[in-house]
């Protein structure tokens, strides 16, 4: 984002009803919290410049950089199942799009940068806590290999934000392949603006899915592609114990990246009904509901695109239903393949689906009963799955976790099972280690980092946590605490939307 950065703002070239031009509102005393050096490099942005006073002024919204064309985009959405005809970027500004060395296009968005025409009475600001939460969790997701928006930089504003308490303010620079949501299409569908739907489908296909752009029916091809992406994405969440917490249709990106780290959390002890969001009283977005909710959201996407599928509505509905019917098998397949990897079943052995499913079901039941830690159960199983090279025994999580006694009958069955697997034990162990992390962003650690920053202006715990989560599959006993489940008094019951 200095002189060498190429901006090419394709969204601004869409018709004016897609957005409002809006500059960020300056803040009084910005200061840098963190710059993501690796991501800067990937984007071709000089991280030294980004961390300089000039870079900080840009992220804080105090300086408009040449080449950027700041806008707030319009969208609608179903929030907790209820229709909201007009949301839009109420506390975010899209600065523009950069093309990196490989020709890949990325949105750079500021979050918490002041009110816009879509703020609906909100202040357009963000406390520093949600900025840190999003930075920590989005970067952890990226390190875990899960498609996600990224965090390029975080600054504090030197201003106060009024919530239940008075809190220090912050701005996050977020990066995504695009910020176009199911809700963006829903907005134009609800206006019966078929021309805009066409325009947006073409834009998204050209930007993300060139094969879909070439298809006979580009809108249907887009729907099918998004279904496939989201089926795999939600399977990845399930496999890692991630609870999104606010799976509204405006929080589902057509690019297939995870977005919105407001009330999200990773599970500690496994329970299928786990909910963390303080506002999700009915448990709509509980862990076990996530695949069903994604399916529901994709039906809303299909409805929005319906006029583009076929001129005959009955035929259009048929096409939509065919596409939607693919979600469940795609999800089930991704989940089952993923579980087989987590449990060390090689392809040769993983033929008996009914047997595998029974074993997976028993595992989750016994984990629920034993209140077993989701992450460490799989990590410990990986360690138990075979010997490593003599003399190269990697550090074990045994000192902080052991498979609970109550799970021993299941463990015996699993051992029998892998003993019969033709795969080399060392290779099995290695492969399991590469999909079963030791470190996830545990909620109590995030909370501690936010409290230190908010109450004591101490960003040390935040930096330590981000650093350790950058290598989630490498356990280091020197960093035992971030891998350890919370003590009873540390358990965080609720997380809050980042408003
Ligand atoms: P979210 O819960 O982050 O998905 O946000 C839902 C909608 O509320 C989006 O349109 C946001 O832009 C808007 N919003 C959330 N917080 C604020 C805020 N503090 N000021 C203005 N708009 C907000
Ligand atoms: Mg949102």
Image (cartoon, grey):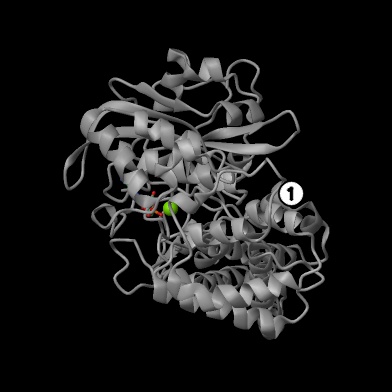
Depicted 372 relative to depicted 93: above or below:
below
Q: Residues within 10 Å of mark 1 (few under 14, many from 20)?
A: some
Say which quadrant the N terminus sits in: top right
Q: Secondary structure at mark 1?
A: helix
Instruction: Name which residue lies at 71% across and 64% down.
Output: 219
User: Is residue 92 or residue 127 the one in the foreground?
Assistant: 127
Q: What x and y, as percent, mark residue 147?
A: 61, 50
Q: What x and y, as percent, mark residue 256?
A: 62, 55
Instruction: Name which residue lies at 52% across and 39% down.
Output: 476
Name the side, left or right, on which 81 lies relative to 208: left
Instruction: Name which residue lies at 49% across and 57% down.
Output: 376
User: Is residue 73 or residue 171 the one in the foreground?
Assistant: 171
Q: What x and y, as percent, mark residue 161?
A: 23, 37
Q: Which residue is denoted by mark 1 in the rendering? A: 206
Depicted 247 relative to depicted 164: above or below:
below
The answer to whether residue 8 is seen in the rendering is no
Is ligand 2 within 8 Å of the beta carbon of the residue shown at mark 1?
A: no
User: Is residue 300 or residue 164 the one in the foreground?
Assistant: 164
Name the side, left or right, on which 492 lies relative to 43: left
Depicted 27 relative to depicted 76: above or below:
above
The answer to whether residue 76 is seen in the rendering is yes
Depicted 418 relative to depicted 455: above or below:
below
Name the side, left or right, on which 157 lies relative to 245: left
- Most extreme residue toward the front is 390
- Most extreme residue toward the left is 165
Instruction: Name which residue lies at 38% across and 34% down.
Output: 462
User: Is residue 22 or residue 488 the one in the foreground?
Assistant: 488
């Amino acid at each position: 984002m200095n002189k060498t950065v190429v901006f090419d703002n394709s969204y601004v070239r869409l018709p004016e009803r897609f957005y409002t031009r809006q500059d960020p509102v300056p803040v009084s005393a910005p200061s840098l919290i963190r710059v993501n050096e690796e991501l800067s490099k990937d984007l071709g942005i000089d991280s030294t410049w980004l961390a300089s006073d000039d870079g900080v002024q840009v992220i804080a919204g105090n300086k408009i950089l040449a080449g950027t064309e700041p806008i707030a985009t319009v969208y609608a959405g179903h929030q907790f199942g209820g229709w909201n005809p007009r949301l839009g970027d109420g506390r975010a500004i899209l600065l523009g799009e950069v093309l990196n060395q490989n020709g890949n296009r990325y949105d750079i968005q500021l979050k918490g940068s002041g009110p816009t025409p879509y703020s609906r009475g909100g202040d357009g600001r963000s406390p520093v806590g949600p900025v840190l939460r999003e930075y920590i969790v989005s970067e952890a997701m990226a390190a875990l290999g899960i498609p996600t928006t990224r965090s390029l930089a975080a600054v504090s504003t030197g201003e106060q934000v009024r919530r239940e308490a008075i809190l220090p303010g912050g701005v996050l620079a977020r990066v995504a392949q695009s910020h176009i949501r199911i809700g963006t299409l829903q907005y134009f569908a609800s206006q019966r603006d078929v021309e805009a739907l066409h325009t947006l489908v073409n834009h998204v296909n050209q930007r993300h899915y060139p094969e879909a752009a070439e298809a006979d029916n580009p809108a249907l091809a887009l729907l099918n592609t998004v279904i496939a992406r989201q089926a795999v994405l939600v399977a990845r969440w399930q496999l890692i114990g991630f609870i999104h917490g606010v799976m509204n249709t405006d929080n589902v990106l057509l690019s297939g990246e995870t977005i919105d780290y407001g009330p999200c959390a990773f599970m500690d002890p496994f329970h299928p009904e786990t909910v963390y969001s303080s506002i999700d009283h009915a448990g709509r977005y509980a862990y076990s509901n996530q695949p069903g909710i994604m399916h529901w959201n994709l039906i809303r996407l299909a409805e929005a695109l319906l006029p583009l599928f076929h001129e005959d509505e009955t035929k259009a509905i048929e096409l939509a239903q065919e596409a939607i019917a693919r979600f469940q098998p795609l999800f089930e397949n991704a989940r089952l393949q993923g579980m087989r990897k987590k449990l060390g079943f090689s392809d040769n052995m993983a033929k008996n689906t009914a047997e595998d499913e029974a074993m997976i079901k028993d595992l989750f039941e016994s984990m629920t009963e034993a209140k077993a830690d989701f992450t460490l159960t799989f990590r410990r199983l990986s360690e138990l799955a075979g010997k490593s090279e003599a003399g190269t025994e990697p550090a074990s999580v045994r000192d902080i976790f052991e498979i609970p006694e109550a799970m021993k009958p299941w463990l015996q069955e699993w051992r029998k099972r892998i003993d019969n697997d033709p795969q080399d034990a060392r290779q099995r162990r290695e492969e399991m280690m590469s999909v079963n992390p030791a470190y996830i962003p545990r909620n109590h650690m995030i909370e501690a980092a936010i409290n230190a920053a908010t109450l004591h202006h101490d960003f040390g715990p935040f930096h330590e946590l981000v650093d350790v989560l950058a290598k989630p599959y490498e356990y280091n006993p020197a960093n035992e605490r971030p891998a350890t489940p919370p003590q009873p008094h540390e358990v965080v019951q609720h997380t809050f939307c980042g408003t």
